[in-house]
Image: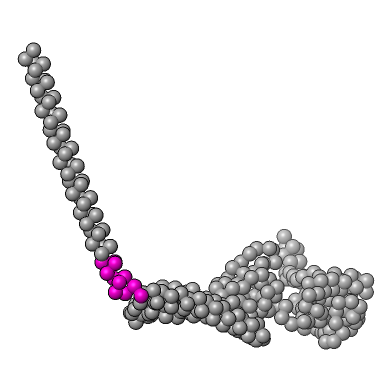
């Protein structure tokens, strides 16, 4: 019985302690809540006082800022639209440069409008401008390669050494230009590979545009044996060129001896054709010239060497 009484007394003491703890925690929570409520009342009182003193001015400034943004948006749209139309009429401005210039002007004008709006609220924009200058320097140093590509893109757009669908050799690559922007030029190689070349590499190297001109000269070579009739061979080759429907009469094709080779007399064969017909003419005249020379009995020799052996008979006799 004594033990049960002891346990009961211990339980009563624990219950009393728990009640005191809960009461203390509740009092602390209530005190914190009242403190927050008091802070909220003070903040509301300050806000009310500020609105009484500055509410009218703030409302006017807010309306003015909204009007600045609305009018700014309309004016920027009009300026960019007229600028885009003016650039479209310029023969020296490509589409990519037009989009780039319009985008830059659009962003700069919006920065000016936002600064005007912030200044209306009393924000000092001087440090902001200085910060933008420092940030621009840091960004320029960090992205100098990208800026180099951008500058090269501007030069490509202004000088227009090639256009879309031109076959060019530039930046160590050859292919058809399938896309151009301010940072890179994309080509499709003859074996159907996609190559993206940075504009800095394109503008920094020699650019060969194979399709810029309407006509091209085809370069082919033909060799005949030293015993063949040069005049007959020349007339045969010229006949093939003049009969080909894609070879141009003006400029007149050229067939002349260009070299005395090791095993043959070599002709340079140079007909002219439309640029789009270059490879068709190149492949067809090579085949037709071979067939015409065979029909005329003119030999196209294989590479050969004459080997002379001295003293072979005397050594054979001695054995």
Answer left or right for 89 relative to 78: right
Answer left or right for 35 relative to 168: left
One can see residue 225 in this view:
no
Q: Position of residue 258 (x, y in %)?
A: 77, 83
Nearer-the-camera pick, 277 or 91:
91
The part of the chain drawn in magenta is: 46-56
Q: Is residue 48 magenta?
A: yes
Q: Residue at x 84, y 71 (%)?
A: 284
Q: Residue at x 74, y 66 (%)?
A: 312
Q: Position of residue 261 (x, y in %)?
A: 76, 78
Q: Position of residue 154 (x, y in %)?
A: 56, 81
Answer left or right for 16 relative to 78: left
Q: Which residue appears farthest toward the front when viewing the image? A: 52
Is 318 above or below relative to 234? above
Determine which quarter of the picture holds residue 219.
bottom right
Nearer-the-camera pick, 113 or 194:
113
Coloration of the structure image: one colour
Nearer-the-camera pick, 283 or 155:
155
Q: Is residue 33 magenta?
A: no
Is 19 above or below relative to 179? above
Location of the N terminus (image quadrant)? top left
Determine which quarter of the picture holds residue 184.
bottom right
Location of the C terminus (image quadrant)? bottom right
Determine which quarter of the picture holds residue 159.
bottom right
Q: Position of residue 217 (x, y in %)?
A: 77, 81
Q: Residue at x 66, y 79 (%)?
A: 162
Q: Residue at x 43, y 75 (%)?
A: 63
One can see residue 146 in this view:
yes
Nearer-the-camera pick, 12 or 315:
12
Our reading of the magenta stretch's main secondary structure is helix
Q: How many marks?
A: 0
């Amino acid at each position: 019985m004594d033990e049960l009484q002891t346990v009961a007394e211990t339980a009563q003491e624990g219950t009393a302690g728990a009640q005191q703890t809960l009461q203390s925690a509740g009092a602390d929570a209530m005190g914190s809540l009242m403190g927050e409520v008091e802070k909220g009342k003070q903040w509301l009182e300050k806000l009310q006082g500020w609105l009484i003193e500055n509410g009218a001015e703030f409302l006017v400034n807010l309306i003015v800022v909204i009007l600045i943004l609305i009018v700014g948006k309309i004016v920027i749209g009009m300026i960019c639209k007229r600028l885009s139309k003016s650039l479209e009429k310029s023969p020296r401005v490509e589409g990519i440069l037009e989009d780039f210039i319009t985008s830059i002007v659009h962003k700069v004008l919006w920065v000016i409008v936002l600064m005007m709006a912030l200044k209306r609220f009393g924000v000092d924009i001087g440090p902001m401008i200085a910060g933008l200058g420092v940030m621009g320097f840091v960004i320029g140093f960090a992205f100098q390669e990208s800026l180099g590509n951008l500058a090269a893109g501007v030069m490509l757009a202004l000088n227009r050494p090639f256009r879309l669908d031109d076959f060019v050799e530039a930046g160590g690559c050859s292919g058809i230009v399938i896309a151009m922007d301010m940072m890179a030029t994309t080509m499709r190689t003859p074996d159907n590979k996609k190559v993206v070349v940075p504009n800095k590499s394109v503008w920094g190297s020699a650019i060969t545009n194979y399709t810029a001109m309407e006509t091209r000269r085809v370069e082919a070579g033909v060799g005949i044996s030293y015993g063949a009739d040069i005049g007959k061979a020349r007339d045969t080759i010229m006949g093939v060129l003049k009969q080909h429907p894609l070879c141009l009469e003006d400029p007149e094709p050229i067939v002349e001896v260009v070299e005395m080779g090791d095993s043959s007399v070599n002709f340079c064969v140079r007909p002219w054709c439309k640029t789009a017909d270059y490879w068709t003419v190149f492949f067809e005249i090579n085949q037709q010239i071979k067939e015409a020379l065979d029909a005329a009995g003119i030999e196209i020799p294989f590479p050969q060497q004459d080997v002379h052996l001295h003293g072979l008979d005397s050594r054979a006799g001695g054995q």
